Amino acid sequence: MDAGSLAGILLALAGILSGLLLEGGYLGQVIQPTAAMIVFGGTLGAVMLQFPLKTVLAAGQRLARVFLHRGDEGEALLRQIVSFANKARRSGIVSLDQELPRIADPFLRQALTLAVDGTEPPELRRIMEVQMENAGEMEARIPAVFESAGGFSPTIGIIGAVIGLIQVMQHLDHMDQVGRGIAVAFVATIYGVGSANLFFLPAAGKLKQRARDEQRLKEMALEGVISIVEGMNPRMIEVKLESFRGGKSPGPEAQR
């Protein structure tokens, strides 16, 4: 669980609701199913019109990554590549063929498969960079879905407010209900602006960071495999790959 994401959204909601209560309001004033239906239904429809259905569904699946994070995968990847480098140095790169079925990361597995098959470093780099570029284009569309939702929802919230005001104006003969009707009408605006700035746009930013982290891991894996093919010393490989993790100190295997 990403504590920062969870704490952030809870803090934002707590601050807004606390302000409402301190001003003498109550929770029921901002819970309006009709307004939610207009805002979220309209936003989803607009997003589906802008993006292919496959991209929208993929964005929904990636949503969990805003709140869930697998931790520092760079350390595990570095240790794995260094172990491959040590084995290749002792027994030759062909010996890594036995390791392929146990590699969970498909990108690393494919890169290492090409290396074992005797692919030259320049060609190996070209093939895997094309794959990274294609995967990166798909990943870039996911945050764009939430950015679009953040752009559409405030406007659709205004549409919901106008619809509510139209209903109010049709019943001006009941003046005692006009004020309450206007207040209810503006709840749609709250939903639209609130969802955009408290969820859709921040989620897009977090997913961009997640995508960049994954891209860096792929770059790290590719550099590691190419270094193994080129016969680089395992300790030098570890020092080289540490730069992808923010220049942390080399581990024990590099310091021996």
Image (tube, rainbow, N blue to C red):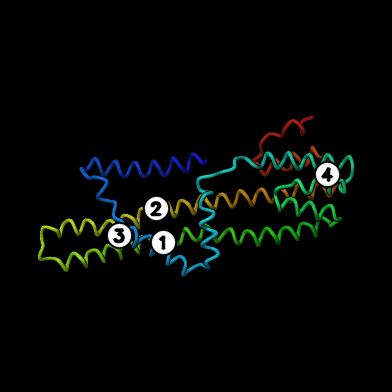
- Lower position in the chain sequence, tag 2 or tag 1: 1
**Relative image position of residue 110 (x, y in whole percent):** 75, 54
Quadrant assignment, res 183 = bottom left
Q: Are marks 4 and 1 in contact (CB under 8 Å)?
A: no
Q: Residues within 10 Å of mark 1 (few under 14, many from 20)?
A: some
Q: Is residue 224 above or below residue 137?
A: above
Q: Nearer the viewer, mark 3 or mark 4?
A: 3
Tell me which residue sits at (10%, 62%) in the image.
Answer: 174
Provide residue 168's location: percent of width, then percent of height: 18, 64
Residue 83 occupies quadrant? top right
Residue drawn at x 81%, y 42% is 85
Number of other residues with Cα within 10 Å of mark 2, as a class: few under 14, some 14 to 19, many 20 or more: some
Q: CA distance from mark 2 to mark 1?
A: 10 Å
Amino acid bearing label 2: Asn
Number of other residues with Cα within 10 Å of mark 4, as a class: few under 14, some 14 to 19, many 20 or more: some
Q: Which mark is residue 232?
A: 4
In what element is the residue under mark 3?
helix
* Type of amino acid at the residue the image marks with label 3: Thr
At numbered mark 4, what does the secondary structure look like: helix, strand or loop? Answer: loop
Q: Counting residues from the N terminus, which is met first, the one under dot 3 or under dot 2?
A: 3
Q: Dividing the picture into quarters, in which one does residue 13 lie?
A: top left
Where does label 1 land, which residue?
151
Residue in the picture at 80% in, 58% down: 122
Q: Nearer the viewer, mark 1 or mark 3?
A: 3
Q: Earlier in the sequence, mark 2 or mark 4?
A: 2
Name which of mark 3 and mark 4 comes first in the sequence: 3
Q: Which marked residue is nearer to the observer: mark 3 or mark 2? A: 3
Q: State the residue position of label 2.
A: 197
Q: For mark 3, what is the residue?
A: 34
Mark 4 vs mark 1: in front: 1
